[in-house]
Amino acid sequence: MRKLFAILFCVLCPIYANAASLINDTEIESVVKEIIAPLATAADISPSRMQVYIVNNDDFNAFVMSGEDVYIYTGLLTRITSPNALRAVVAHEMGHMIGGHMAQMSAAMDAEMKRTMLIQALGVGLMVAGGNPSLGAGVMAGATSIARQSILFFSRDEERMADDMGLNLMVRAGVNPNGFLDVFNQMNDMTSHIESKVNPNAINHPLTSERLKNVRDKLDSPEIKNKKFKSDSADMIQQYAMVRAKLVGYLDNAERVKTLYPYSDKSDAAIYARAIANMRGGNLDGALVGCKTLVSRSPNNPYLYELLGDIEYAYGHYDDSVSAYERALKLRPKSPQIETALALVLTERNKPGDKDRAIELCKRVILVDETPLSYWTLARAYGENDGRSDWAMAEYYRMQKSSEKSREYAKRAKTKLQKKSPEYIKSDDILNQKK
């Protein structure tokens, strides 16, 4: 169980940014980034600058920050069934960014807050001045209600505009805007029974049925209807199916995996999900058979060798695990998560030169994509009596937002390290940070 936990920690290591739990996974991030790259280009954003973050949350949600940071929830990825539908969701979120809606919403809320305070001041004045107390209380309550309705109206209007801008963005990118139909049809199936009982003026989004009609009307317009759009390749559809299967395999329970990917399903995605679920459940023989089946079908897929490395590590077959990870890195160089996994196995195998190589790998990872696991593995590679190990653990706890533990290890590191060493200086930096 200890080894299995380490594998899961390695493959889907959560990091914390803005109090959100994020999943680091090279395969998922790279596939999603490739899917949305045309949108970035159409929005005059270099795809190389766009960063994709996978939020470990089952909500059907996504958002874009600063135009370049795209946050996509696992609940959305596991439910959205096609690359183009996912693209439509991101296009909508980028529509908010293009329209400057966050700044506008902030300004609107500020204006409504001021108006509410003025009206509430009138209500307080009526009560203090000896007027009708119930009238004053009514004015105050009414002010809050008016502000809330105003903000909801503003939000619904922005959602309509974001749909329109997102659809235009897909058209400009040359990708099929019918992805919006796929998303809203799916959302309508999920929410129609609830929305039929909801006051449309009491929610911050337009009803899905309204959004679906608006999109259909726009798609029927001559300037869009007569255009030809690029369709997703069979390879892209397959890659996305594998991403969804991977998430289900790692995040859902065994029963749900069997429901979504029954043994009668012999597709690559189904075998992938079941192999991962078997590994999680300790059925390593089943996991290995599934993984080797996939490798025989797609011998140049680096992520299958990554999974093979995980499974062999769980067996305790360190040489085979190292070989699998090395094969993965030959096929997909500069992959921080795979490099960290390899470093972890090297620290466990501990043959001559293994720990030095693990240190080298971890340092390389930290330069480009630091994670808690990269520091934790680095600490193992240095060894517990090395002050650099204490510094690495201080950095690990810093990333885990555990200030007390981080400072404890930083203090310990300073007692063992030379004063001018990089690790001493970094430990000092941790101690000088504001709590």
Image (cartoon, rainbow, N blue to C red):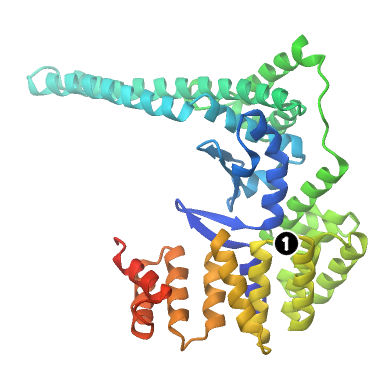
Q: Quadrant of the C terminus?
A: bottom left
Note whether 28 is above or below 367 in the view shown.
Answer: above
Residue at 23% in and 19% down: 119
Q: Position of residue 126 (x, y in %)?
A: 13, 18
For the view shown, which residue lies furthest in the front direction?
A: 420
Q: Nearer the viewer, residue 284 or 89?
A: 89
Instruction: Please identify the quadrant where the N terminus is shown.
Output: bottom right
Question: Residue shown at 46%/79% (left/top)?
Answer: 388
When asked about the image quadrant of residue 177, the answer is top right
- The amino acid type of the residue labelled 1 equals Pro
Circle 1 — which element? Answer: loop
**412 vs 93: above or below:** below
Q: Is residue 370 visible?
A: no
Residue at the extreme top of the image, as rendered:
222
**Residue receiving disc 1:** 333
Q: Nearer the viewer, residue 435 or 49?
A: 49
Quadrant in which residue 237 is drawn = top right
Image location of residue 176, percent across then percent down? 77, 27
Image location (x, y in percent) of residue 395: 44, 69
Q: Residue at x 62, y 29 (%)?
A: 43
Please give left or right for residue 238 compared with residue 148 in the image: right
Closer to the camera in the image, 233 or 242: 233
Marker count (numbered): 1
Q: Nearer the viewer, residue 295 or 416?
A: 416
**From this viewpoint, is residue 235 visible?**
yes
When the figure is inspected, residue 360 is found, relative to residue 73, above or below; the finding is: below
**Could you classify mark 1 by the number of other residues whose Cα lies within 10 Å: few (under 14), some (14-19), or many (20 or more)?**
few
- Is residue 78 depicted above or below 390 in this figure? above
Residue 166 point in image, percent of width and height? 63, 26
